[in-house]
Amino acid sequence: MANNFDLSNLALQALCPSNEILYDDKGLPSIMVKIPKMTYAQLGLGSSTAIFPAFIVNGSEVDAIYISKYQNIVQNGRAYSLPGQNVKHTISKDSSASACEAKGAGWHLMTAFEWAAIALWCKKNGTMPKGNNDYGKDASDSIYQAIPDNKDASHYALRVKTGTGPLSWSHDGTPAGIWDLNGNVNEWLGGLRLVKGELQILANNNAADSSHSQASSSAEWMAIKGSDGTLITPDGTGTTSGSVKLDYVSSAWKWIDGTISSSSDSSRNCAFESVSADSGLHADTVLLLQALGLLKYDSTAGAYNGDYLYANNGADERGFGRGGHYSFGSQAGVFQGGLSHARSNTGAYLGFRSAFVQLPSA
């Protein structure tokens, strides 16, 4: 962590008080945004004063999490958050995680709960960010563009340099915010996956600690019991009795705890606001799905700006990415989700960002 004599940090915080330069174990910097500990109520999910899961690691509360201000680059096998850079892309989930964890203790691939905390905050505070989802600009804008890092054969911008868009591309609408959560590259996240349509997570934000394995065969993965929202040991085939699963019903995704009626090993989609939960799911289960940003809590038409959820509920394992990319158009955004890619997938539209937490004892 920075000390009181770090002049670079003092200069940064004079302009952006919530920002901090954090150094990895090689002494190299990343610009991070500090997100202080919050409750469900502070994030707009009911009135509970319980601490939101993103701020619970190894069974203990942490005072804050630090999120990369920018989508990451990779230098010498390590991830960095710096402005005006060509974002790292064409990278698998495991390689993304390795580049984060190589920086030292507490560094990790941004997790599903951490992303959800930011998305929920944006929704509650009316600052749903725009971004590069239409070849260098936002689909809703005709004027504002960012600096491209490359163009296609037709001279359309694809990815853009980190943090070069207008203020509306920041999560809080200010220079101090987190940039490019909407579009540019779809970001791999840790701590959540589908196995044959069964939702599996790591407890709370344990995915922030690299000692908790997220390998395909890891025993850390837990299913969710539909009848009470507790975590249960999966059977390994995606057919755990009573676990929460993703079904495709009437052309929309639906969370259930029974047998999937429609599975496919190709990706299908629907608007995020059309995703539903079976009426038999316990209230705590529904709250957990909402806390993961996988189920709406606001039923107002258009409340989620047209964001979409893509998923493959027939494959052995599918990882999780969010945000959309440079050609997603209005389907991109902080509630856009993709449970469609194998962890080994790469592509010019896939990237990531690192996060940091001061780890409590396991």
Image (spheres, grey):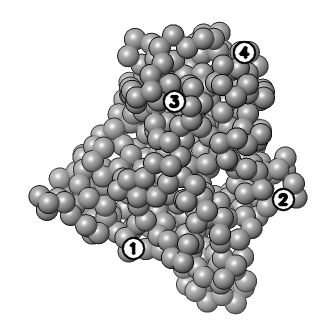
**Mark-to-mark CA distance, 3 and 4:** 19 Å
**Mark-to-mark CA distance, 4 and 1:** 47 Å
Q: Amino acid at mark 2?
A: Pro
Residue 130 place in picture, x, y as percent: 35, 51
Quadrant occupied by the N terminus? bottom right
In the picture provided, is 303 more to the left or to the right than 95? left
Q: Which mark is residue 85?
A: 1
Q: Residues within 10 Å of mark 2 (few under 14, many from 20)?
A: some
Of the numbered discs 3 and 2, the one sitting upstream in the chain is: 3
Q: Evaluate whether residue 117 shows in this view.
A: no
**Mark-to-mark CA distance, 3 and 2:** 35 Å
Q: Amino acid at mark 1?
A: Gln
Of the numbered discs 4 and 1, the one sitting upstream in the chain is: 1
For the point 46% across and 31% down, the residue is 311
- Out of 117 and 91, give the one closest to the viewer: 91
For the point 50% across and 71% down, the residue is 74
